[in-house]
Image (cartoon, rainbow, N blue to C red):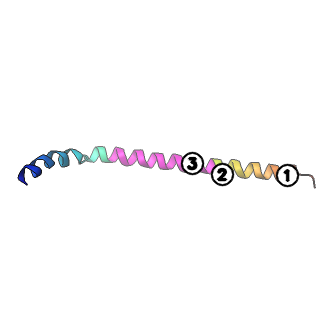
Amino acid sequence: MSSMERSNRPLIRMSRLTSREHDTTVLKATTIIMLCLVATTLLFILYQDAQYAATKAQPQ
């Protein structure tokens, strides 16, 4: 059992992120989420604009 504990310790130590690594990871995740939100908003605006143009072009 003690040999298992010794083999797991370096793995646990390596898996911990430093505060700087954690900050960059959070920044990357936040940037990706913000880019997705911007892209979704732009696509929604383009869709609404196309829908409006299509209804406007129909003969009355």
Q: Which residue is identified by label 2? A: 44
Residue 40 in the figure: left or right of residue 50: left
- Please state which amino acid type lies under the numbered disc 3: Val
Q: Secondary structure at mark 3?
A: helix
The x, y position of residue 24, in whole percent, is: 35, 44
The local crowd at label 3, few if under 14, some if 14 to 19, many if 20 or more residues have their Cα within 10 Å, is few
Residue under the image location 70 percent in, 50 percent down = 47
- In space, the residues marked 1 and 3 are separated at their CA atoms by 27 Å
Q: Which quadrant of the rendered structure holds the C terminus?
A: bottom right
The magenta stretch spans which residues?
23-42
Label 3 belongs to which residue? 38
- Relative placement, left or right, of 60 versus 40 is right
Residue 56 locus on image (x, y percent) = 85, 52
Marks 3 and 1: in contact by CB < 8 Å? no
Q: Position of residue 31 (x, y in %)?
A: 46, 46
Q: Disc number at residue 56?
A: 1
Q: How many marks?
A: 3
First of labels 1, 3 by sequence position = 3
Which residue type does callout 2 highlight?
Answer: Phe
Residue lying furthest front = 1
The residue depicted at 19 percent of the width and 46 percent of the height is 11
Quarter of the image containing the N terminus? bottom left
Question: Given this view, does label 2 or label 3 mark the residue nearer the observer?
Answer: 2
Pointer 2 or 3: first along the chain: 3
Name which of mark 2 and mark 1 comes first in the sequence: 2
Q: Secondary structure beneath disc 1? A: helix
